[in-house]
Image (cartoon, grey):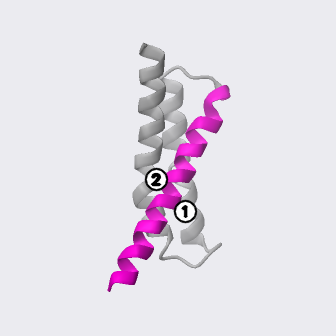
Amino acid sequence: MDFALKLFGVTLLALLINLPLGYLRQNCEKFTFGWYFYVHISIPVIIFLRVKAGFSWHFIPVTLGAAVAGQLIGGRINRRFKRSD
């Protein structure tokens, strides 16, 4: 139970950290410094969380998937707000 709760927590944090970054990334032109910055700045934080929780490298796809989902959802929220203006 403790293992599943830790995994859920780290995965949820990866997603939540990337929501605002995906929102901000949407305002940058693709492949510029700002775009790369917003895509990659959360990686050290997610690695730290994964290591502190005691997960091996086998769980990288789980946290990476959550990070990508957070980026995509944040970008979609930004586009919706821009469309409603």
Main SS, magenta region, reads helix
Q: Which mark is residue 4?
A: none
Asked if disc 1 and disc 2 are in contact, CB closer than 8 Å, the reply is no
Q: Is residue 71 above or below residue 83?
A: above
Where residue 2 appears, as percent x and y from the top left, is: 42, 14
Q: 63 and 53: which one is in front?
A: 63
Circle 2: residue type: Asn
Q: Which residue is mark 2?
A: 18
Is 56 or 19 nearer to us in this picture?
19
Using the image, determine if residue 34 lies above or below residue 40.
below
**Depth check, front residue: 34 or 23:** 23
Residue at the location (54% across, 70% down)? 34
- At label 1, which amino acid type do we have? Phe
Disc 1 crowd rating (10 Å Cα; few below 14, some 14-19, many 20+) is: few
Q: Which residues are magenta?
A: 57-85
* Residue beneath disc 1: 37
Instruction: Classify residue 1 as left or right of residue 28.
Output: left
Q: CA distance from mark 1 to mark 2?
A: 12 Å
Q: Quadrant of residue 47?
A: top right
